[in-house]
């Protein structure tokens, strides 16, 4: 997996506390961004489904019946 460098700002006290607790800030940031992306993707998928929900389709009923033979 290719990686890229990025910079972000973090509250000074929070960064100090994280370091004191031995938290790897890079890993925590990666994990947080990955979770945010998963969440945003799920919300976008949900919104797309709500805009265009699946509807019954006679074609698939016929195709499934044909396949059961």
Image (cartoon, helix red, strand yellow):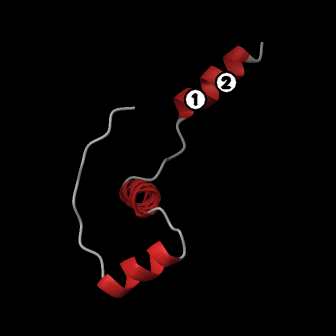
Q: Kindly identify the residue that appears in the image at 23 percent across and 54 percent down.
A: 6
Please tell me which residue lies in front, 51 or 19.
19
Nearer to us in this view, 16 or 48: 16
Rendered view: 4 above or below 10: above
**Residue 42 versus residue 54 in the image, above or below:** below
x then y, percent, for residue 40: 38, 60
Counting every numbered tag in the picture gives 2
Q: CA distance from mark 2 to mark 1?
A: 6 Å
Residue 22: image location, x then y, percent: 53, 69
Residue topped by disc 2: 64
SS under mark 2: helix
> Residue at the spot x=70%, y=15% of the render?
67
Residue at 58% over, 29% down: 60
Rendered position, 55 above or below 2: below
In the picture, the disc for residue 30 is: none
Horizontal side, residue 6 vs residue 47: left or right: left
Residue 42 image position (x, y, % from top left): 46, 57
The quarter of the displayed image where residue 65 is located = top right
Describe the element under mark 1 as helix, strand or loop.
helix
Q: Mark 2 and 1 residues: CB-CB less than 8 Å, in contact?
A: yes
Q: Nearer the viewer, residue 33 or 4?
A: 4
Number of other residues with Cα within 10 Å of mark 2, as a class: few under 14, some 14 to 19, many 20 or more? few
Q: Which quarter shows the C terminus?
A: top right
Q: Position of residue 1 (x, y in %)?
A: 40, 32
Q: Which residue is rendered at x = 68% and y = 16% of the image?
A: 66
Residue farthest toward the right in the current orientation of the protein: 69
Q: Would you name the residue on which mark 1 appears?
A: 60
Which sits in the foreground, 36 or 46? 36
């Amino acid at each position: 997996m290719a990686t890229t460098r990025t910079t972000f700002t973090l509250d000074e006290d929070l960064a100090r506390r994280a370091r004191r607790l031995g938290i790897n800030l890079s890993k925590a940031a990666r994990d947080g961004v990955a979770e945010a992306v998963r969440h945003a993707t799920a919300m976008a998928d949900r919104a797309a489904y709500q805009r265009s929900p699946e509807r019954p389709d006679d074609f698939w009923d016929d195709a499934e019946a044909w396949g059961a033979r």
